[in-house]
Image: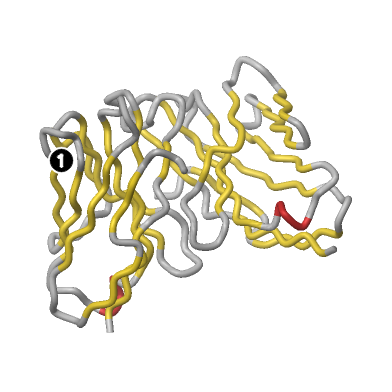
Amino acid sequence: QQQVKQSPQSLIVQKGGISIINCAYENTAFDYFPWYQQFPGKGPALLIAIRPDVSEKKEGRFTISFNKSAKQFSLHIMDSQPGDSATYFCAASNNNDMRFGAGTRLTVKP
Amino acid sequence: DSGVTQTPKHLITATGQRVTLRCSPRSGDLSVYWYQQSLDQGLQFLIQYYNGEERAKGNILERFSAQQFPDLHSELNLSSLELGDSALYFCASSVGSGTGGGDGYTFGSGTRLTVV
């Protein structure tokens, strides 16, 4: 059963714009929320992650916003660049389980 | 380079055949996870091994099996292959025994399997 719902399925953004990808989870036992970036023909790579004791984490142009009460979290990519074009997967995990969202294909147009 | 090595990168085989995919985890990692990613599909968890022992099982078909060897490398065996088995197969590794991977997984670059 899908325990992490990710939207949108695809996203087209102009260069310099903000890309926003949303995820919602069901299991309140999850305590680690990573985002993975996957380029065509490559494996997913850990991009940024957050734990539920904070509401936001920023690394460069990438920010995770986390809403524990709503069981939702999102990835914001500021000043999106063509090189950010990739598939992004959110995930939710605890020690015994890891669930991935279905992925969002991001295209940043120059 | 993530440190997780998968071979071969590409594999083309006929229906009904058997293939073996190989994965060497990142140095120091004891857990190996296998995932399947079909065209435009998400990541489907197949199986996890920790230090040579099966730890968790996901949506793995009975035609598929895996093992982890004493040197910690792992092999995924796919038999009686069908057209629908065509996919990217990823191996990931982590330090701990948890299926959740602790602070996340490190993925390899995958093996692209094409069944014709």
Tell me if residue B22 comes above or below residue A74 in the rendering: below
Q: Residue furthest top?
A: A53
As displayed, is residue B31 above or below residue A56?
Answer: below
Give percent across and percent down for residue B48. Answer: 25, 40
Identified by mark 1, the residue type is Gln
Nearer the observer, B58 or A13:
A13
In the shown orientation, is residue A47 left or right of residue B13? Answer: right
In terms of image quadrants, where is residue A13? bottom right
Q: Residue at x 12, y 39 (%)?
A: B69
Q: Is residue B32 left or right of residue A68?
A: left
At x 70%, y 24%, the residue is A57
Quadrant assignment, res A83? bottom right
| Spot occupied by residue B32 in the image (x, y as percentages of width and height) | 27, 38
Q: Which residue is mark 1?
A: B68
Q: Chain of mark 1?
A: B
Where disc 1 sits, the SS reads strand
Residue closer to the observer: A93 or A12: A12
